[in-house]
Amino acid sequence: MTKRSQFVTKTGVIAATVGSAVGLGNIWRFPYEAGVHGGGAFLLLYIVCIFLIGIPVMLSEFVLGRATHQNGVGAFRKLAPRSPFRIVAYMGIIASVMILSFYSVVAGWIMEYLFQSIEGLFWNVDAEQYAERFAAFISNPWRPALWTLIFLAMNFLVLRRGVEKGIEKISNILMPVLFILLVIFCANSLSLPRATEGVKFLFTPHFEELSASVVIGAMGQAFFSLSLGLTCMLTYASYFSDSTKLTQSAVLTAILDSLVAILAGLVIFPAVFSFGKTPEEGPKLVFEVLPSIFAEMTGGHIWSVAFFLLLFFASLTSTISMSEIFISYLVEERRMERQKASILNTGVCAVLGVLCALSFGPLSEFTICGKNIFDLFDYVASNIFLPCGGILLSLFAGWALDRAIMRNQLTNDGRLSARWVKPLRFCMRFIAPIAICIVFIYGLL
Ligand code: PHE
């Protein structure tokens, strides 16, 4: 087996896991899901899911990844060769391909907006026209598909360079800048007229509106946003060094990730109400609202270019991590060259991605259970595959994994305090899997 690379620095580990976690999931998906599902109650459930389910599942992935230094399939091969649990690794590969396919479409929309910002196309239209223009763009028969392919090509170029060089450098510099920009936009949105309505929408839970779809949506969003349940964090943890503090990294990643989502909510919702829009717009929400926000700001032109550029990089650090699941499997289990594996991953996602891109235009009539291909991929991967993966990963880590391995991983072979080992293992064995099952059962009733 070839020698595997490692993340070189401690900040590199955090930057890479946060880079995977923070992306369109926080800035595009969170506001749209929160908007569709009534705001406050969704946010509360989402936070509960992050801490009760997300952190234990993330630690399960970290432990399995670093204990084995293998890709998902390899980790199970090493720890429990014939156990049926290994299906989770194959499910993860399928989920990663599905997510990468529709994610690249949205990243393509971001690139279109970046292009429009640079060209200055946002500024000579009325605010009401933003929605129409976006609708015209996504229903165009070729433009969104072309951007999807361009994005996938860029993702491919970064992938070829391997783990530490490409990912670490990019995310080390850009994530903090994105964070600062969001804080500035947030201050701006909060100063808009009727901003408080948006804040109330996001923070006041209306439990009378609670329904199965809200609960399932919140759990799916927690998994999606933390990149969990598809062995992505497992694969990343396989590149961690022995001194990486797993618990600390998981908690920090979860906190930073939720913070970015809430900030994005505080940028979007005050503006939604201020510009007289409704929060239930779905995937289009952020794209209809952001141009109006920038148009209101002094120097809006520069802000929007900077923002879409950073968002593009945030998407890229996430798609790189998704791609790594399939690629590391092909390279390590199938002995394929990295270059070929990257081409295969990109090729499959290019075909599926184009189908997703066209599902707002020429393929919009093609629906299954009322969802177009794009929505279907998102729904099935995020709300079903990832939580199912989460159940299996935490059950495996909690019940099947040797207790000593768990302890050694969480304490770095006894160098860190063992205070959290028992409660965390308890969460992996009982709390996380039971909580996920309860949400599913609630959803089916
Ligand atoms: N967590 C990423 C985001 O929020 C998306 C992602 C999902 C990345 C699954 C990797 C795996 O944008």
Image: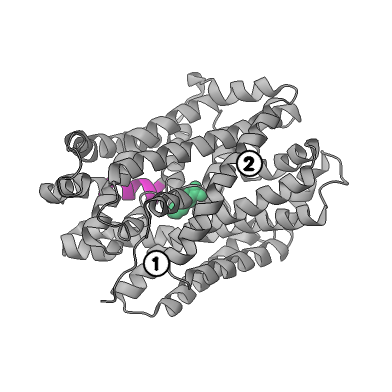
Give the vertical position of 316 relative to 284 (above or below).
below
Give the residue drawn at x 21%, y 57%: 67
| Labels 1, 2: front one | 2
Dot 2, crowdedness within 10 Å: few (<14), some or many (≥20)?
Answer: some
Which image quarter: residue 148? bottom right
Give the residue drawn at x 29%, y 73%: 3
Q: Circle 1 is placed at which residue position? A: 326
Q: Mark 1 or mark 2, which has the lower sequence index? A: 2
| Apparent side of residue 137 relative to residue 390 in the rendered image (left or right) | right
| Type of amino acid under label 1 | Phe
Q: Give the overall secondary structure of the magenta segment.
A: helix
Give the residue drawn at x 59%, y 46%: 177
Q: Circle 2 is placed at which residue position? A: 181
Relative depth, front residue between 171 and 380: 171
Q: CA distance from mark 1 to mark 2?
A: 33 Å
Res. 60 visible in picture: yes
Residue 94 at what x, y percent from top left? 40, 61
Whether the magenta-drawn stretch holds residue 156 is answered as: no
Give the residue drawn at x 32%, y 79%: 335
Give the vertical position of 207 relative to 443 (above or below).
above
| Type of amino acid under label 2 | Leu
